[in-house]
Amino acid sequence: MKTIISTEQAPKAIGPYSQAVISNGFAFLSGQIPLDPATNQLIDGGIAAQTERVLENLKRVLEAAGSSLDRVVKTTVYLKDMGEFAKMNEVYGRYFTSNAPARATVEAARLPRDVAVEIDCIAAVD
């Protein structure tokens, strides 16, 4: 049994996937890139601005799923350049201030639309 989650408050899926799927008490969120949900266009700015947009997008999908950043149990961060880790991590830390989720961070050769960062997550839901 699974429930598909879709919200206009986050960028539309740009392929054959769902923004999130709820199954067995967890929300599995697809990776978000720094798209402005109002325009579905990439935002301007470096890794810090992109990370903030990505986390805001995830936050909105989590809310649509009946969850929140506080209930995230695992994230995966994909970076175009691991040299940008510290800047990404500083922004990330502002969103996960206590009881931080488990996390993996990897450098990817290429991300969708050549963005600097993509993040996916898994969160508990009621």
Image (spheres, grey):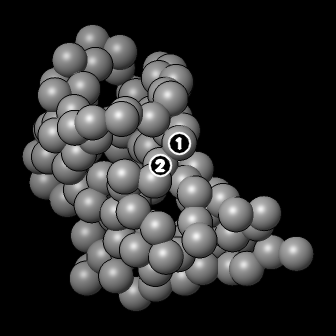
Q: Is residue 84 visible?
A: no
Dot 2 and dot 1 residues touching (CB under 8 Å)? yes
Percent coordinates x, y for residue 56 in the rendering: 27, 61
Q: Tell me the residue that label 2 is attached to.
A: 72
Is residue 101 rendered to the left or right of residue 95? right
Residue appearing at x 49%, y 76% in the figure: 66
**How packed is label 1: few (under 14 Cα within 10 Å), some, or many (20 or more)?**
some
Q: Tell me the residue that label 1 is attached to.
A: 73
The amino acid on which the numbered mark 2 sits, given as a three-letter code, is Val
Residue appearing at x 73%, y 79% in the figure: 3
Residue that protrudes farthest toward the top in the picture: 83
- Of 22 and 112, nearer the camera is 22
Residue appearing at x 69%, y 69% in the figure: 22
The quadrant in which residue 43 appears is bottom left
The amino acid on which the numbered mark 1 sits, given as a three-letter code, is Val
Q: Quadrant of the C terminus?
A: bottom right
